[in-house]
Amino acid sequence: MSCLKICTGDLNKKIKIIDKSQDGLGCSLNFLTPTKATVWAKIETIDTISGNGRRIFDNTNVGQTATHKMTIRGRTDIKSDDLIEYNDRYFTIQGFKNPNEDTRWLILYCIERGDVNNSRNEL
């Protein structure tokens, strides 16, 4: 069995988990959306150029390559339609993993959508 080796000191980036499903307009970031939680995370970029990115398939069977891997303490309220905000940049959650199935850590595979002034934010 593989074990995730992480220290709490590795969680050095503060991120917001945004409940996009509570946004009355569905996806606009121009309006305030409720923050589900503010948590500490370890953020790693994923090398998508060399093909090392993690391919994520949703119910449309269209694969997208995750650009970032974020490790947080285990939570049970994270959904795939939540958003992540970090330093005025937004990420959509494409998938997540509960290593060792012990709910101690949660790994989120995300795709960066840009910042508040970037047209890529149309989620």
Image: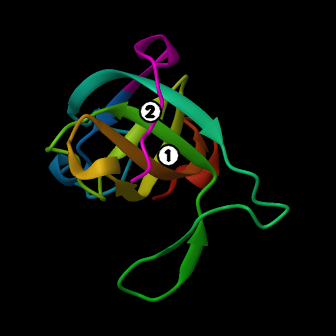
Q: Mark 2 Cα within 10 Å, few/some/many (few <14, many 20+)?
A: many
* Percent position of residue 57, x then y: 46, 78
Q: Can residue 6 be seen in this view?
A: yes
Amino acid type shown at disc 1 = Phe
Q: Position of residue 45 (x, y in %)?
A: 67, 41
Percent from the top left, x then y, of residue 14? 43, 18
Which residue is at a point 44% across and 39% down the rendered structure image? Answer: 4
Determine whether label 2 and label 1 are within 8 Å by CB: yes
Identify which amino acid the numbered label 2 is placed on: Glu
Q: Nearer the viewer, residue 45 or 20?
A: 45
Position of 82 with respect to 66 (left or right) is left
Q: Give the range drawn in magenta.
A: 1-15
Q: Does the magenta stretch include residue 113?
A: no
Say which element carries label 2.
strand
**Residue annotated with mark 2:** 85
For image coordinates 54% across by 44% down, the residue present is: 69
Q: Which residue extends farthest top?
A: 9
Q: Which residue matches tag 1?
A: 91
Marks 2/1: CA–CA distance: 6 Å
Residue drawn at x 48%, y 38% is 70
103 or 37, nearer to the observer: 103
Would you place residue 75 above or below residue 12 in this image? below
| The quarter of the displayed image where residue 96 is located | bottom left
